[in-house]
Image (cartoon, grey):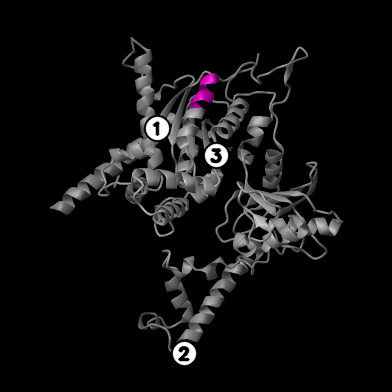
């Protein structure tokens, strides 16, 4: 007889929602609750914008319009993050989950022993939905506490659709008295702010948090939202009849290709498929070698960037700025403040210390990417195809990060028909330089090369949900992997309670410290 650990059959599930502003997250949370209900799970919704008000702030929220209210909530959250940490919103959610867990047990049980800590007793078939997360630190903390029990749902809608939604709500909140151009300008401005607040170290950062999703859903309409959520929840609860889509398989392949990259900046992978979903070629960002292809671990001598200890692209960008500083110095165009620094390299260091929106570190010079030795994943895949004599006309490329402008022109020239990506890449000028050939507008299809964001189960959850082994019993197909509907995760010991206590206690201590400091300042 084998030893067996006690396993929770229906563990608590914690869902985090993230979406760019303009996506109807009310629709997403409602549909998610409906889908969980069909699996026998109850749900509790936690709104972070409500929970954050439990902590006082000097920021007041102006509710005179939709955009001003949103701006106020952003500033309120930014203030809390600046004082208590960039993941404080997640700690507030954890504290709320503990309180809800306790209340659920009290409501369900008439006679509860005082010896039982209800806040640390799992609730069977219970889900908590956190609306909404805005920074990667918030996502990472929840993952570190709850592990596979935490599921991040990244909800997407096309930019034009989101802009219309915000304009409509802004117009409605103002009573239709504001000029259309002003409504449009305010709506567009809040979208940019929501994506990433460069001017605030503790601000919104949806651009970096969104790609961390376990599933990417299309929340453009009720039907697309329900369809994509229904499929994910069915797979998550072990439906054997659902297998990967072509997009899911393609992106998982691209992600696996990225893992062989040793690039010092990031790992990017690309996979090109024929119209019949046949793998044509793979690529990752790596240093090319003589004879074709890129370096592998076994190749000697090894000339990858890490063997030299630095990224030449960063070095050359700094050399360009130092060259400009030298020329300004010779022509007498440097300010007295900068002339206090004797060496041009010292001036450079001082300029780079300013990480605000107006600083050199955020300038277009620092966005230059053409001095790297590595070949980008997309170009690696394309040149591999060229070397093998494989035509890419009409093919589809899956890439983990949005292509840069250097890769975009090669994608167009290779005859690739469609590009699917997960992570955005703000440094890319692809749309600006090649608007004649590429199309990012999903609402108005054209004959251009289509660039679109990935929807489906992410590469991070691919094996968890699709690796199931035998799907029959006594020769008959089983609809559900575990015999009935239950989450495709294994939870043996709910160790997350200790982490919850630690984090909630740490926040309580920080609140006391700030409260004492405020009293001292007032004296």
Residue at left offset 26%, top offset 46%: 57
Q: Residue furthest left?
A: 523
Q: Secondary structure at mark 2?
A: loop
Above or below — where is 345 with respect to 54? below
Residue 260, percent across and down? 69, 51
Q: Secondary structure at mark 1?
A: strand
Residue at left offset 79%, top offset 44%: 275
The Cα atoms of the two marked residues, 1 and 3, are separated by: 23 Å
- Name the residue carrying label 1: 46
Residue 59, percent across and down? 27, 49
Q: Secondary structure at mark 3?
A: loop
* The disc label shown at residue 331, or none: 2
Residue 225, percent across and down? 56, 33
What segment carries the magenta color?
32-39
- Give whichever of discs 1 and 3 has the lower sequence position: 1
Q: Is residue 467 left or right of residue 132?
A: right
Above or below — where is 337 with respect to 69? below
Residue at left offset 57%, top offset 52%: 424
Q: Is residue 277 magenta?
A: no
């Amino acid at each position: 007889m084998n030893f067996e650990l006690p396993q929770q059959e229906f563990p608590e599930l914690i869902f985090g929602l993230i979406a760019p502003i303009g996506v109807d997250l009310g629709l997403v949370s409602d549909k998610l609750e409906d889908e969980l209900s069909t699996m026998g799970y109850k749900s509790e919704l936690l709104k972070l914008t409500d929970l954050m008000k439990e902590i006082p702030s000097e920021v007041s929220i102006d509710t005179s319009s939709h955009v001003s209210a949103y701006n106020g909530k952003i500033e309120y959250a930014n203030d809390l993050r600046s004082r208590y940490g960039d993941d404080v919103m997640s700690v507030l959610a954890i504290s709320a989950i503990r309180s809800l867990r306790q209340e659920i047990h009290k409501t369900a049980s008439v006679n509860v022993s005082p010896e039982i800590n209800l806040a640390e007793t799992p609730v069977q078939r219970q889900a908590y939905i956190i609306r909404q997360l805005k920074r990667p630190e918030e996502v990472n903390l929840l993952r570190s506490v709850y592990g596979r029990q935490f599921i991040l749902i990244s909800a997407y809608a096309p930019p034009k659709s989101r802009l219309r939604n915000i304009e409509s709500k802004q117009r409605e909140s103002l009573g239709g008295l504001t000029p259309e151009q002003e409504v449009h300008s305010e709506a567009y401005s809040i979208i940019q702010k929501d994506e990433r607040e460069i001017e605030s170290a503790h601000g919104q950062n949806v651009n970096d948090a969104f790609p961390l999703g376990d599933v990417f859903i299309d929340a453009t309409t009720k039907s697309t939202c329900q369809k994509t959520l229904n499929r994910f929840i069915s797979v998550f609860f072990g439906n054997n009849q659902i297998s990967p889509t072509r997009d899911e398989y393609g992106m998982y392949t691209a992600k696996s290709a990225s893992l062989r990259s040793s690039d010092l900046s990031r790992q990017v992978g690309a996979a090109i498929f024929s119209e019949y979903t046949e793998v044509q070629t793979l690529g990752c960002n790596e240093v090319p070698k003589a004879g074709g292809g890129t370096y592998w671990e076994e190749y000697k001598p090894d000339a990858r960037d890490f063997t030299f200890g630095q990224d030449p692209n960063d070095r050359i960008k700094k050399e360009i700025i130092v060259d400009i500083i030298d020329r300004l110095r010779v022509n007498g165009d440097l300010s007295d403040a900068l002339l206090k620094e004797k060496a041009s390299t010292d001036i450079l260091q001082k300029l780079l210390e300013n990480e605000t929106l107006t600083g050199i570190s955020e300038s277009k010079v620092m966005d230059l990417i053409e001095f790297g030795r590595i070949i980008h994943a997309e170009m690696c895949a394309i040149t591999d195809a060229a070397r093998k004599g494989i035509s890419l006309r009409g093919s589809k490329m899956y890439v983990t990060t949005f292509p840069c402008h250097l890769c975009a022109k090669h994608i167009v020239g290779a005859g690739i028909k469609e590009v699917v990506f997960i992570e955005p890449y703000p440094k890319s000028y692809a749309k600006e330089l090649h608007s004649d050939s590429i199309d990012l507008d999903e609402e108005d299809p054209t004959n251009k090369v289509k660039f679109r964001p990935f929807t489906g189960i992410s590469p991070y959850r691919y094996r968890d949900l699709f690796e199931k082994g035998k799907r029959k019993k006594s020769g008959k197909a089983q609809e559900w992997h575990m015999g009935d509907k239950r989450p495709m995760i294994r939870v043996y010991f709910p160790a997350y309670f200790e982490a919850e206590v630690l984090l909630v206690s740490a926040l309580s201590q920080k609140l006391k410290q700030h409260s004492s400091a405020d009293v001292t300042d007032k004296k």
